[in-house]
Image (cartoon, helix red, strand yellow):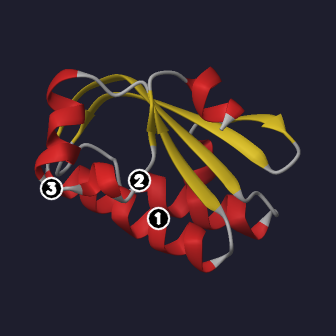
Amino acid sequence: MATDMLFEEIAPGTVVVPLSGKLMLGQGGGQIVGMVEDLLRQGKRIFIFDLSGVAAIDSTGIGHFIASFNKIMGAGGDMRMAGATGHVLESFKVSLLDTVFPFFPSVEAARAA
């Protein structure tokens, strides 16, 4: 089940989802969208994805965030990206998604936004 993924509720309705490893085709990243759907049904509206532990991402991984963003925004929520660096951050910049998703240097900065 999608909610098997780890998340932490840091304030009422606000969750941090720490991700790690590779978010690529065949790597299980599809669970992200299912987890977002489950958490939206539970009334969560602010999602902070902690990407500091993500080593690699491809277009499939980015696609999971686009799908999640559409669901979150459709529910009147907010999606924030935290801790992305190097190749991971560049992947979002190349696709211009850094102008769509707000990026923050840390979870703390995203939480304060």
Give the residue number, with chain letter if any, for mark 1: 69
In the rendered image, which quarter is residue 63 located in?
bottom left
Task: Mark 3 vs mark 1: give the one in front.
Answer: 3
User: Position of 11 compared to 87: left or right?
Assistant: right
Q: In which quadrant is the C terminus drawn? A: top right
Give the residue number, with chain letter if any, for mark 3: 95
Q: Amino acid at mark 2?
A: Phe
Helix, strand or loop under label 1: helix
Helix, strand or loop under label 3: loop
Q: Is residue 88 above or below residue 63?
A: above
User: Position of 65 compared to 58: left or right?
Assistant: right
Give the residue number, with chain letter if any, for mark 2: 101
Helix, strand or loop under label 2: loop
Q: Residue at x 15, y 36 (%)?
A: 90
Marks 1,2: beta carbons within 8 A: yes
Chain-order first, disc 3 or disc 2: 3
Nearer to us in this view, 78 or 20: 78
In space, the residues marked 3 and 2 are separated at their CA atoms by 11 Å
Residue 1 in sight from this viewpoint:
no
In space, the residues marked 1 and 2 are separated at their CA atoms by 8 Å
Marks 3,1: beta carbons within 8 A: no
Dot 1: within a 10 Å radius of its alpha carbon, few (fewer than 14), some, or many (20 or more) residues? many
The image shows residue 72 at horizontal and vertical percentages of 58, 67
Nearer to us in this view, 84 or 27: 84
The image shows residue 60 at horizontal and vertical percentages of 19, 57
Q: In which quadrant is the N terminus drawn? A: bottom right
